[in-house]
Image: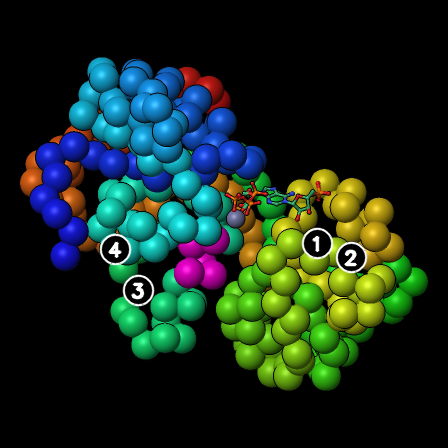
């Protein structure tokens, strides 16, 4: 079990797409921080809310283990983590506390340009490059298709050209990267956006009250922006 804490700890992406908007959002809730020398831990000055800067992939695990209370992360990462835990027979314990309405993208299946798309069944027996094997696997099962996921942590879109895979299942926002690699999206298997993730239970040691205050301010900040 995690050590008792009376300050709220929020996990935010260190660099990458969601890091800056997440910190801006928290700043718009009135948070100010004292930067530490290693710059991985930001001590909250205006409120007892500290920030831990991490890889986005680590955020669900940090919350599940109670090391952090909340995190700003893409739904795609949260869903993949949830399915991974389920596959390992461990109970899922996270939920989306808020949807943030930015960081939108889709997890799409994309096939070589010029190929005809007749539906999921045509993927049977094919190699599908992806960083989201669990989410892809669930979709394949739901569609009764047996295919071969090829798990890559980056450069998924180039896999067909390298002969590593036949098609891909990857995140898409503008579609420019797919197009540049001669691929076209044919079906969406998950709609994603940035969310506030947290445990599916109340926080302890007074941290729920701090989280409630943060969420109230956050709801106000989100409304102001709309
Ligand atoms: O270092 P760390 O592990 O923390 O970062 P990361 O490289 O894993 O993640 P990052 O920063 O690339 O993305 C963080 C989150 O942003 C993702 O988990 C998604 O929830 C969200 N997001 C939104 C995206 C995109 N849009 C997106 N376009 N994540 C990735 N992409 C990729 C896409 O796959 C393509 O390769 O960006 C490229 C450009 O996309 P197009 O469609 O505009 O060409
Ligand atoms: Zn990542």
The residues bearing labels 2 and 3 have C-alpha atoms spaced at a distance of 33 Å
Which residue shows up at 37% across the image and 18% down it?
Answer: 28
Circle 3 is placed at which residue position? 92
- How far from the left and from the top, in percent, is residue 136? 58, 68
Residue sitting at 30 percent across and 19 percent down? 33
Which of marks 3 and 4 precedes in the sequence? 4
Residue 148, position as x, y percentages in the image: 66, 78
Q: Earlier in the sequence, mark 2 or mark 3?
A: 3
Q: Which numbered disc covers residue 219? A: none
Tell me the number on the disc at residue 158. 2
The residue under the point 56% across, 52% down is 191
Q: Is residue 108 visible?
A: no
Q: How far separated are the C-alphas under marks 4 and 3?
A: 11 Å
> Quarter for ligand 1?
top right
The correct choice, above or below, for 194 with respect to 33 in the image is: below
> Mark 4 sits on what residue?
65
Task: Inspect the magenta stretch and tell me whether residue 216 lies in it.
Answer: no
Of helix, strand and loop, which one carries label 2? Answer: helix
* First along the sequence among labels 4 and 2: 4
Q: Are marks 2 and 1 in contact (CB under 8 Å)?
A: yes
Left/right placement of residue 189 relative to residue 164 reads: left
Is there a contact, CB below 8 Å, between mark 4 and mark 3? no
Q: Which mark is residue 155?
A: 1
Q: Which element is circle 4 on?
A: loop
Q: Residues within 10 Å of mark 1 (few under 14, many from 20)?
A: few
């Amino acid at each position: 079990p995690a050590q008792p804490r009376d300050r709220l700890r929020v996990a935010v992406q260190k660099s990458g797409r969601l890091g800056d908007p997440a910190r801006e959002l928290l700043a718009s809730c009135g948070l100010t921080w004292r930067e530490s020398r290693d710059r991985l831990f930001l001590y909250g000055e205006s409120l007892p809310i500290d920030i831990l800067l991490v890889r986005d992939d680590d955020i669900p695990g940090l919350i599940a283990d109670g090391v952090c209370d909340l995190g700003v992360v893409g739904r795609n990462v949260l869903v993949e983590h949830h399915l991974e835990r389920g596959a390992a027979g461990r109970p899922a314990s996270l939920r989306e506390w808020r949807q943030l309405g930015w960081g939108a993208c889709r997890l799409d299946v994309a096939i070589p340009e010029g190929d005809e798309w007749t539906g999921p069944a045509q993927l049977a027996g094919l190699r599908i490059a992806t960083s989201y094997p669990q989410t892809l696997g669930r979709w394949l099962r739901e569609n009764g298709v047996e295919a071969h996921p090829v798990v890559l942590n980056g450069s998924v879109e180039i896999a067909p050209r390298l002969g590593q895979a036949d098609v891909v299942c990857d995140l898409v926002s503008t579609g420019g990267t797919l197009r540049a690699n001669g691929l076209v999206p044919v079906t969406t298997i998950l709609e994603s956006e940035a969310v506030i993730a947290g445990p599916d239970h109340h926080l302890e040691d007074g941290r729920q009250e701090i989280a409630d205050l943060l969420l109230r301010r956050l709801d106000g900040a989100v409304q102001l922006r709309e």
